[in-house]
Amino acid sequence: MKRANGSGFGGLLTSAAVLLGANPVHAQITITPGAPTHFTTEQAEHAVDQSTLDQPGTAAFDLRLQFSPANNRVAAADYTGTVEYWWVSPTQWRREIKSATFHDIEIQNGANTWDKHEGDFFPAWLQKIARAPIQPLPLPAQDLAAGLGRADIKYMMGTANFQWAINPAVDDQRSTNKAMIQLQVSTGRINYTIGPDWDGEYKDFQDFHGKPIARQVSADPVVGQVAILEDLAPQAAGFFDTAKPGGDAHPLDSIVLDTDDLRRNLAAEPQFTWPDMMDGPFEGEISATVTIDQTGKVRDIGYIVADNQDLRAAALKGLQTLTFKPFTRDGVPVQVIGRYAIQFKAHRPAGAENFEPAKTYLDRANHLSFLHAPGHKPYHLVATVVVFTPNGPKTGTFEETWLDETHHRQDLTFGTAHLAETRDGDQFHHLAEGLAEGTGTGSFEQIMRLTSPIGPTNTLYEGDWCVRRGQGNDKDLIGVIGCSPNDRGGRDLDANRAVWVNAKGEFVHAFTQRVEIRAQNPQPYDGANLPRELDIYAQGRQVIAITVAKVEPAGKVELDLPDHPTATPGIVIVPPPPRTVK
């Protein structure tokens, strides 16, 4: 019993809540994985093109961005300033950057440039916020098109997320070879972009000569507001002069390098020491973007990405010991931006119980207690669904045919109301008919997750979960519990995100989004000990009972449903009043 992109047992709660009522209406909905519509590579290119100012055909403009800290993690005085562009064309423009520690004027006029800077270090964050308002994804058009064409695309909560390797010939999963853009499907506009030496978050789009341009641009740790974006006024003679005296012999350039290049230029081996920990993972990678000045000194360490968040403090101490020989290009010292990665191996304290990884427990429970896991045969399941409403129990029928992970169908019927969901390869279809007038299906996936005891684990981040043994009467149970690092060097457990298994590894009960799912009456079928009933509780009261009436080998199933996309509002489930549960 597995949900299809938010279906299965989850669909039962959804349908029970929305399909009971009068004045039936009909709707058919077709979706792709995790999103209400498809987003093409060409649309992604268009979104980038529309929000890029520094390209041929853009009207000459004056843009001024005022930036300040996005949070209280940094000192306001050090992260406040302005960026201004006076732009005529890609070959004629002037940019001025002002901050507390760095001031730079750069001019481009034809093939000639002029640059003058004050300050010995151009921070990576300042480079990013300076570029972000006019160039959200700084790649040549042909490279952008090629990257989007081979990108891995994921749809999540109304967004399309494109991620690709900048150089596909290099087998490097680190961020120095990765680019990403997230687009809002409903508007086709950019939410944010990430790359080796750029990132930006974009909000408050307003028109400028037919282009939707964000008026709020963020690049960690600062947020910028576009104070001016208007047609460029005539400038004084010499404003774009690149022959005037006083410029620097060499601009303060930065280059992007990967971990291997950084290591080859180490002046000494860094010192990393890993403490004992209660929670895993105990082996993995930690990395951070480092910015190195012209002398080889590390001047900035970005956010530390760790497979185990408990080790971030220890990693910072080790990264602070990095020292490099000066980097040069054509014999001229340059700054360097690069992601430095290190492998870690830690251990539990002596005497602590040795648990398996969280994913191992969840995958085992899926296989031992449910039929959708790899290794089980196709099946057809019929269940009775009872929803306890303020007006008394309502009974419906759930039917599921599961051929494999990418081919399955679920149907739910309450009286004249009927919901069907199918997956046929990469096509997902929803059909809803006989719903009460005004009832929507927009929140199906969210509500379906409430009764999906164990979600998919292919994207599970091990560091978000802790494994603990139960206490008291539950001492024979193992819990996989959501957790997060705290300021005390440990982790805070979230009992509302937990899956509990018995000594055999079978599913017992789970907590998710303030409801509890209990497995009852397990019976063997096709190598699994399948629960013949799932009871769902909210605020201590039972709200749904799902009882398996029949399970058998799968037969033929129709996966194609009528296609008629329609927009529908969201829905809300309100827990029923107290009732007596025997």
Image (tube, rainbow, N blue to C red):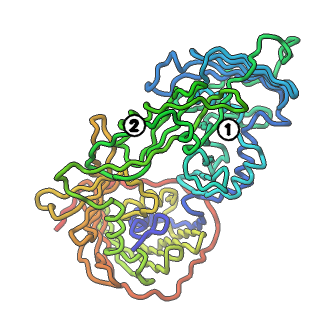
- Mark sitting earlier along the chain (1/2): 1
| Amino acid at pointer 1 | Pro
Eyeballing the image, is 581 above or below 176? below
**Residue 136 shows which numbered tag?**
1
| Element assignment for label 2 | loop
- Left or right, 119 with reference to 357: right
- Residue 543 horizontal side relative to residue 571, left or right: left
Residue ID for mark 2: 271
Percent of width and height locating residue 516: 28, 59
Mark 1 secondary-structure assignment: loop
Q: Nearer the viewer, residue 458 or 53?
A: 458
Residue 206: x %, y % from top left: 69, 33
Is 156 on the left-hand or right-hand side of 239?
left
Q: Tally the numbered discs.
A: 2
Quarter containing the N terminus: bottom left
Q: Name the spot of residue 375 as percent of width and height, x first.
A: 41, 80
Q: Would residue 444 appear left or right of 120 to someone viewing this image?
A: left
Based on the displayed image, in which of its 4 quarters is residue 315 positioned? top left
- Coordinates of residue 191 in the picture (x, y in percent): 60, 42
Q: Amino acid at mark 2?
A: Gln
How packed mark 2 is, by other alpha carbons closer than 10 Å (few <14, some 14-19, many 20 or more), is: few
- Closest to the camera, between mark 1 and mark 2, is 2
Quadrant location of the C terminus in the rendered image: bottom left
Kindly give the residue lying farthest to the left in the view shown.
472
